[in-house]
Structure formats: C-alpha cells, structure tokens
Amino acid sequence: MKIVGVAACITGVAHTYMAQEAMEQECKKRGIECKCETQGGMGIENELEQDEVDAADVVILAVAIGIEGEDRFEEKKDAGRVLNLNPAELIRDPAATIDKAIALVK
C-alpha cells in the first residue's frame, strides 16, 4: 500500500506540519509507504512528483485552502481514490483517516 498526500492550512504553519506528521506517523505504524507534500508558509516542501502520485494507491488531501498543482490528482479523483478532509480531522484522528483511505482501495 502506498499513500501520498498534501497538507495545507489557512495560515500555512502549525496545522500543515502537524497534519503531515500525523499522516506519516500513522502510516509508519502500519507499514504503509507514505509521502506528504506540504504547502505552507515556507512554500511547497517535499513536493510530490507525478510518478509518485501515479504509483500511489490513494491520495489524502488534508487541506483547508486551495492548493497548487491539484490537477496532478485528477486521475485518482476519477477513480474514487482521493480522500478530502480538513487538516484538523487528520490531526485529531489519524487512524480513522488512514482507515478511510484504505477503504477507498477495497
């Protein structure tokens, strides 16, 4: 299983990076390969390449604002493999978020 994601909050500071950490930690616990791009106060960090998006089983968009490069995920959206949620949801319950993401693949 491979998950990629983008985290972005309104101010682009705390919740962006907290969401990234929550996603990565929960995936690590489960042995799931994960990469999370952040779009925050420091700009785009850990940027996802198109081949990484294409190889992923599911995409998690933990965003509270519009993000750059959202078109990269169109094919996954069309396949029903994109989970959209607020960063606060991911921070509050990362296990439930990853469960929902896995359910999109089954």
Image (spheres, rainbow, N blue to C red):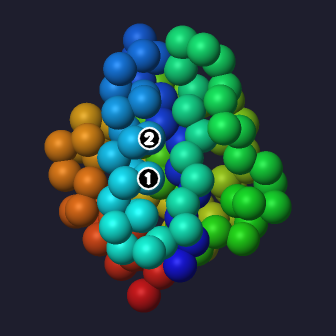
Residue at image coords 44%, 75%: 31
Q: Residue at x 39, y 42 (%)?
A: 21
Identify the residue shown where x is 42% and y is 28%.
16
Q: Residue 90: x percent and y percent?
A: 29, 46
Which of the numbered marks, if any, corresponds to residue 91?
none
Left or right of 21, for residue 49: right
Identify which amino acid the numbered label 2 is placed on: Gln
Label tally:
2
The residue furthest left is 92
Q: Which residue is disc 2 drawn over?
A: 20
Image spot of residue 106 (x, y percent): 42, 87
Q: Position of residue 39 (x, y in %)?
A: 57, 27
- Estimate the spatial distance between the alpha carbons at disc 1 and disc 2, rounded to whole Å: 6 Å
Determine the secondary structure under disc 2.
helix
Q: Residues within 10 Å of mark 1 (few under 14, many from 20)?
A: many
Percent x, y for residue 37?
Answer: 60, 40
Q: Is residue 20 visible?
A: yes
Residue 64 seen by the camera: no
Q: Which mark is residue 24?
A: 1
Say left or right for 47 vs 87.
right
Q: Quadrant of residue 50?
A: bottom right
Do callouts 1 and 2 mark residues in contact (Cβ within 8 Å)?
yes
Q: Dot 1: what SS?
A: helix
- Residue projecting furthest to the bottom: 106
For label 2, the crowd category at 10 Å Cα-Cα, with few meaning under 14, some 14 to 19 and many 20 or more, is many
Amino acid carrying label 1: it is Glu
